[in-house]
Amino acid sequence: MATEKAYKLLAQQEGISNSQAKSMIDRGLVYVGNKKVMIARGDIDVKTIFRVQKVEKPNIIFQNSDLIVVDKPAFVNSDEIERQFKGAQLLHRLDRETSGVLMLVTNEEFREKAIKEFAKDRVYKEYIAWLEGTMAEPITVDKPIMTQKKNNKAYSNVTPKGKPAISEFYPEEVSAKKTKAKIIIHHGRTHQIRVHARYIEHPIIGDEQYGGRRAKRVMLHAHKVKLLGMEFVSPEPKAFIHFE
């Protein structure tokens, strides 16, 4: 059987550069049948036909002279969104596979005011997630989190040496050993919901880094943010409503 590196084969198939092909695989956008291609440099049969998941464009939810709020699609880095809006700066970040409300600022005075609100935990942040297992009752996790970077990749864990972090989990729907939950977070540490979900043994489906089963994406969505008297909502993605 003749083989080739997955990213090189994808580049030929899609008529794109090797680096673009590698980036697509690294983002989790490339499938063979229903199986995600995990390793860009892995050898694969040259007859393989890839299926590439298209990335949606970010929709603007709200815009004024201070702020641009977008509905971030999954599989896009927050930095890429920032580059699409000249003169705008990220106010916070969402993980690459997390979709939903993402805020960018266009005014320095407003940015400083907003950062103080985040620092004082006066920003309401509500998420929706599909979790492993059956969660019958609401659970509040008040456990500090520490983040380390390894090979340019962040990894967080619960430890007494970490920074304060509180996540409130409210089950809304239970089906076939999985639970859809509303999650309200305080502080907002790197990977906070993902780490706290694993800590209570209900990891997020699709979040293989923190113990979830493989899925088309990490099933986490930033649904609602309230900041300085304003409220921004990103509708629940179709993938969440019809998730089997």
Image (cartoon, rainbow, N blue to C red):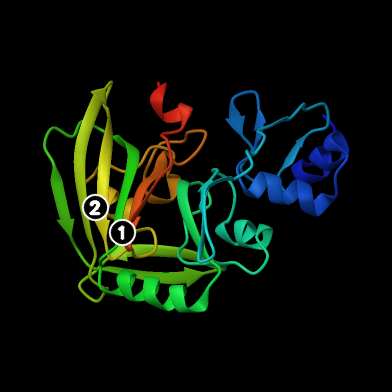
Sort mark 1 into few (<14), some (14-19) or many (20+) by Cα contacts within 10 Å: few
Q: Position of residue 220 (x, y in %)?
A: 40, 43
Sort mark 2 into few (<14), some (14-19) or many (20+) by Cα contacts within 10 Å: some
Mark 2 lies on a secondary structure that is helix
Q: Position of residue 79 (x, y in %)?
A: 60, 62
Q: Residue furthest front?
A: 65
The kind of residue on which mark 2 rests is Tyr
Mark 1 lies on a secondary structure that is loop
Choose mark 2 or mark 1, whichever is in front. 1
- Depth check: give the residue in front, 196 or 40: 196
Q: Contact (CB < 8 A) between labels 2 and 1?
A: no
In the rendered view, tell whether residue 12 sits above or below residue 199: above
Q: Residue drawn 29% across and 49% down?
A: 198
In the rendered view, tell whether residue 122 sits above or below residue 177: below
Q: Residue drawn 26% across and 56% down?
A: 185
- Depth check: give the residue in front, 138 or 37: 138
Q: Position of residue 17 (x, y in %)?
A: 85, 49
Q: Position of residue 143 (x, y in %)?
A: 19, 63
- Depth check: give the residue in front, 90 or 6: 90
The kind of residue on which mark 1 rests is Gly
Q: Is residue 51 left or right of residue 97?
A: right
Q: Which residue is mark 2?
A: 199
In whole angstroms, how far apart are the C-alphas of marks 2 and 1? 33 Å
Which part of the image, by quadrant, shows the C terminus? top left
Which mark identifies residue 229? Answer: 1
Which part of the image, by quadrant, shows the N terminus? top right
Q: Residue drawn 27% across and 48% down?
A: 197
In the rendered view, tell whether residue 83 sits above or below residue 203: below
- Give the mark, 2 or 1, whose residue is nearer the N terminus: 2
